[in-house]
Image (tube, helix red, strand yellow):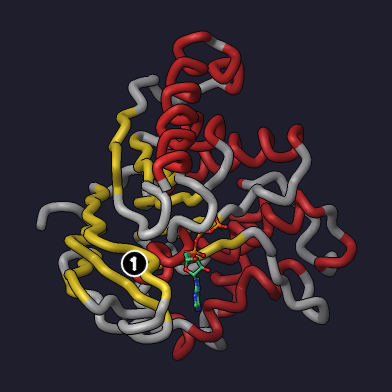
Amino acid sequence: MTGFVDLRDVRLTYGGAADGTLALDGLTMSVKKGEFAAVVGPSGCGKSTLMKLATGLIAPQNGTIEVAGHEVDGPVSVAGMAFQNPSMLPWRSSLANVMLPLEIVQPHRSKFRSEKQAYTAKAEALLELVGLKGFGDKYPWQLSGGMQQRANLCRALIHDPALLMLDEPFGALDAFTREELWQVMRDLHAEKGFTTILVTHDLREAVFLADKVFVMSARPGTIIREREVPFERPRPIELTYESAFNDIVHELRDLIANARAAA
Ligand SMILES: Nc1ncnc2c1ncn2[C@@H]1O[C@H](COP(=O)(O)OP(=O)(O)OP(=O)(O)O)[C@@H](O)[C@H]1O
């Protein structure tokens, strides 16, 4: 396989082959190093399942999964993750929340004490990059939802993961805040160059951020279309009001509507 993340002919059934739920079947997809991929599809088609498989949280009954050239057979340490709910620890400051993975993930864990000053500077620099300069000492409950999600992105990136997995990270935010966060995400990806897989229900979000959008069928999920997004980077937010942009959004919408109807 040739990508940075490769899934080939993957099948996943929850709860036993006989009477379980077949979530994914015959799913094949490949994401290149540094690429920003989005995954869209009908509700319940298996998008989150795909994320759990690619990060090694669950194993498929059939097929192969490779990340960074290695077959996945347990939690993938090169991955950072962010979900819809930022789930920050309320008793820790934002800075301490951002630094949490360094206390857990090797090789950082072993040198956390001796390198604490450098790690703190790194976390502060990341907070600044997402527009949270000076908020490191605030507790999560002192931050707005959008600010919490910014800090959550920093926490996902603090250990310099080569792969960032995002499952509906902006889904709970209002439209304006969401667009702000798209731009934060665009700039983080441009600066750091990590490979990204974003699961989203928001087709504008997918087209704005991604190099390639994977469209899934209804459950059992499989990939029914890979749509390249041709727009140059960096992409201004005004792009989302242009007709060429909306044409792709409509094309994706039609594919998903048809997939739902076929279910
Ligand atoms: N732990 C589980 N045990 C049993 N069934 C599950 C489990 N997790 C998911 N499923 C089922 O597998 C299917 C795919 O679920 P998944 O959460 O991957 O879909 P999704 O596309 O992310 O959903 P949504 O669009 O609603 O976010 C669904 O039918 C779901 O009910």
Mark 1 surroundings within 10 Å by alpha-carbon count, few (fewer than 14), some (14 through 19), many (20 or more): many
Q: Could you say where residue 259 lies in the image, as x and y percent from the top left?
A: 41, 40
Q: Could you say where residue 101 lies in the image, as x and y percent from the top left?
A: 54, 77
Question: Which residue occupies 58% across, 53% down?
Answer: 168
Relative side of 179 to 246, left or right: right
Quadrant where the image shows the N terminus = bottom left
- Tell me where residue 78 sits by quadrant: bottom left
The residue type indicated by label 1 comes to Ala
Farthest right residue in view: 142
Relative side of 7 to 2, left or right: right
Mark 1 element type? helix
Question: Which residue occupies 37% across, 70% down?
Answer: 22
- Tell me where residue 12 sits by quadrant: bottom left
Q: Nearer the viewer, residue 119 or 94?
A: 94
Q: Which residue is mark 1?
A: 54
| Res 33 seen here | yes
Q: Nearer the viewer, residue 24 or 36?
A: 24
Q: Nearer the viewer, residue 38 or 25?
A: 25
| Res 57 seen here | no
Q: Is residue 133 above or below residue 120?
A: above
Q: Could you say where residue 186 lies in the image, as x and y percent from the top left?
A: 51, 37
The number of numbered discs placed on residues in the rendered structure image is 1
Q: Could you say where residue 124 lies in the image, as x and y percent from the top left?
A: 65, 60
Relative side of 44 to 107, left or right: right
Question: Which residue occupies 72% across, 71% down?
Answer: 88
Question: Which residue occupies 11% across, 53% down?
Answer: 2
